[in-house]
Image: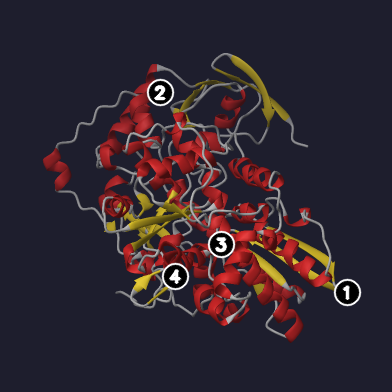
Amino acid sequence: MLNQVNVTVNGKAVSVPSNYSILKAAEMAGVRVPRLCFLEGTHEEANCRVCVVKIEGQKGLKPSCKTAVTEGMVVTTDTKDIYDSVSSNLELLAANHKFECWRCSRENSCEFLDLLRRFSVDNHYSAEEFEHKTFQLNDTSGSMIIDSSKCVLCGRCVSACQKETGLGILNFNRRGTKTYVGPALFHNLEDAGCIYCGKCIQACPTGAIREKDDIKALERAIRDPKKIVIAQVAPAVRAAIGEEFGYKIGTNCEGQMFQAFKELGIDEIMDTNFTADLTIMEEGTEFIRRVQEGGVLPMFTSCSPGWINYLELYHPEYIPNLSSCKSPQQMAGALIKTYYAQKLGKSPHDIVSVSIMPCVAKKAEANRPEMGRDGYKDVDIVLTTREIGRLIRHRGIKFNELDPIKPYGLLASYTGAASIFGVTGGVMEAALRTVTEILEGHSTPVDFNEVRGLENIKEATYRVAGMDVNVAVVHGGRAIGDFFKLMESNHKQYHFVEFMGCTGGCINGGGQPIVNAETLEKVDVRARRSKVLYNIDANNEFRKSHQNEAVQQLYKEFLGKPGSHVAHDLLHTHYHMREAYSDKKE
């Protein structure tokens, strides 16, 4: 057990563990110290000098995030010298930042702007001087944009990329006044091995790294009288969209969300939860066939496009292990342009298929050439949770005053199993609920608690139809790499493995609302959002995917049976090896 030390911060005495920084001790004393580059557990390098404090008996100002406490230390955080020093540093940063707040994706969540306001910083640069500076704009990927004119070189994105994924795609390029953050070796994101998980976006305190904005495409589609707009929405979106409008983290705003979609002018809703249930029917059938007919095991889930990118780029030898199922997003898109179009009496070319997702990688997934047919795409437009939040605000819709409604549309019903797709372990648990019941031939348990929780790698063994089924749940790029090493070293026969590209699963996807660094230090965001989806599951009358009557009707009317020729043509796909840095640049 660590020793406690006594520290005084702004006249308040506090006893803290001896390994605490001054910044953390100040928080224990209820003192708010500003910070910009600091991101607890990710980037703690004291680059920005915004968190400086005065220590009695020592010369100069010290960075509170990097300075450890000592017994009897007396700290002051808010003197004139400190205020002037922080203000000067912010002025220097502001002189190199392009202010386009009216069009910036971080208009409501910019930590840098909050600091400038807090310290009443004036921007002294001239427009002419700024225009002569050299900036890099990396916007070729179709999913993410890196704009060095907004970058304050804090390093948070670089550290997040390394610590969250283990890939180290981002780095500081060049030196001196020409330094900018981007993929190493001056590559673009699409050929640098990026999996589009968006952890860098969530770490950035400005709008320097952001998703590709597709709001305008939806705005135009809604206003086109020749088009009918059908939107699908992922389970994790309803657990987080309220944060865009001031709701507490962990608030279920599903009903208000559907009403907002209606007021935006979206014609039909096909809830992605519906195709989450459908995914279990297809994926579960595929798993049973592999077990009974000697197919490739373990079978890997294929719902997360960030994970798919990881596998295709870094471990293509395991592509045969992937389920051939499309993700729920792409299944929904395929059905919208076929079954749904027939139901509505519309040509697929007159339908705009829109997806509201917690994920940046979904934008790239929708653009894969195999995700469509007959000259049209399954999914035309993908908006993140943040984008749909911005659109609702810009339209003047008062989200907080909306009366909640049920989802509208022909294919919007879902079971509890579908809702937990947005949580790490949720796909596995949903699959187990259905697969065990089919194999056992009688009702089986609903809750599989062993695959729940936020451990990076979870394992469990279940006795099913006379055999031990070994399963694992893995989330986050770094954990994926760790699991492959584990699988190769322990020689254990796994049967079914769920992978997610983001830690926590989709509820912590790269397209979810930005949570500032100070809140992240105090709140377990992943746990709170997860609880929303588990509550939806617990309160649903039907909690197993095969109990979804609308899905069963879909099979009767259109697909035939799980794994049928029609189902395989529409709902399944293939994956292929890709190379990072394949187009090498000098």
Tell me whether circle 4 and circle 2 mark residues in contact (CB < 8 Å): no
Q: Residue furthest top?
A: 11
**Vertical side of 157 occupied by 391: above or below:** above
Q: Is residue 567 visible?
A: yes
Q: Please, what secondary structure does the residue beneath circle 1 have?
A: loop
Q: Please, what secondary structure does the residue beneath circle 2 have?
A: helix
Label 4 vs label 2: CA separation? 64 Å
Residue type pointed to by label 2 = Ile
Label 3 vs label 4: CA separation? 14 Å
Give the mark nearest the N terminus, 3 or 2.
2
The residue to which callout 1 is attached is 466
Towards the viewer: 404 or 502: 404
Tell me whether circle 3 and circle 4 mark residues in contact (CB < 8 Å): no
The residue that appears at 71% across and 46% down in the rendered structure is: 538
Where is residue 447 shown, x and y percent of the image? 77, 53
Q: Residue furthest right?
A: 466
